[in-house]
């Protein structure tokens, strides 16, 4: 079975600042949500917000489902 995490706990957020490699501006973003930040406070508010937590939960669920499908296919079930 897939490793389970306690319900209601979120993994730690990604680093608040992810530098852009192809832009000259100082903007930063959340790759998961596509949100852009002008300063660390905006980033912190985003990572603590409902939208990001919902997207993170959706991503975790899809990863768990994909993992369980991979196990089913390899065992022939």
Image (cartoon, helix red, strand yellow):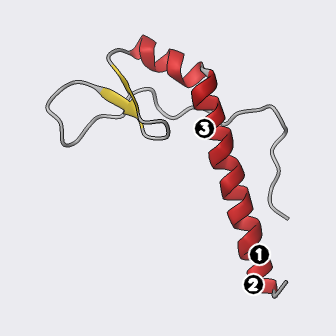
- Nearer to us in this view, 15 or 62: 62
Q: Position of residue 34 (x, y in %)?
A: 42, 36
Going from the N terminus, do you reach mark 1 or mark 3 first?
3
Contact (Cβ within 8 Å) of mark 2 with mark 1: yes
Q: Which mark is residue 71?
A: 1
The residue tagged 2 is 74
| C-alpha gap between disc 1 and disc 3 | 24 Å
| Residue at far top of view | 41
Q: Identify the element where label 2 is drawn.
A: helix
Q: Identify the element where label 1 is drawn.
A: helix
Q: Dot 3: within a 10 Å radius of its alpha carbon, few (fewer than 14), some, or many (20 or more) residues?
A: few
| C-alpha gap between disc 3 and disc 2 | 29 Å
Q: Dot 1: within a 10 Å radius of its alpha carbon, few (fewer than 14), some, or many (20 or more) residues?
A: some
Horizontal arrangement in the rendering, residue 27 relative to residue 42 (left or right): left
- The residue depicted at 45 percent of the width and 20 percent of the height is 43
| C-alpha gap between disc 2 and disc 1 | 5 Å
Which of the image's four quarters has the N terminus? bottom right
The quadrant holding residue 69 is bottom right
């Amino acid at each position: 079975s897939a490793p389970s995490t306690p319900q209601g706990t979120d993994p730690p957020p990604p680093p608040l600042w992810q530098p852009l490699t192809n832009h000259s501006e100082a903007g930063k973003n959340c790759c998961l949500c596509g949100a852009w930040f002008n300063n660390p406070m905006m980033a912190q508010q985003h990572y603590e917000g409902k939208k990001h937590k919902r997207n993170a939960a959706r991503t975790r669920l899809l990863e768990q489902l994909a993992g369980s499908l991979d196990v089913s296919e390899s065992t022939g079930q």
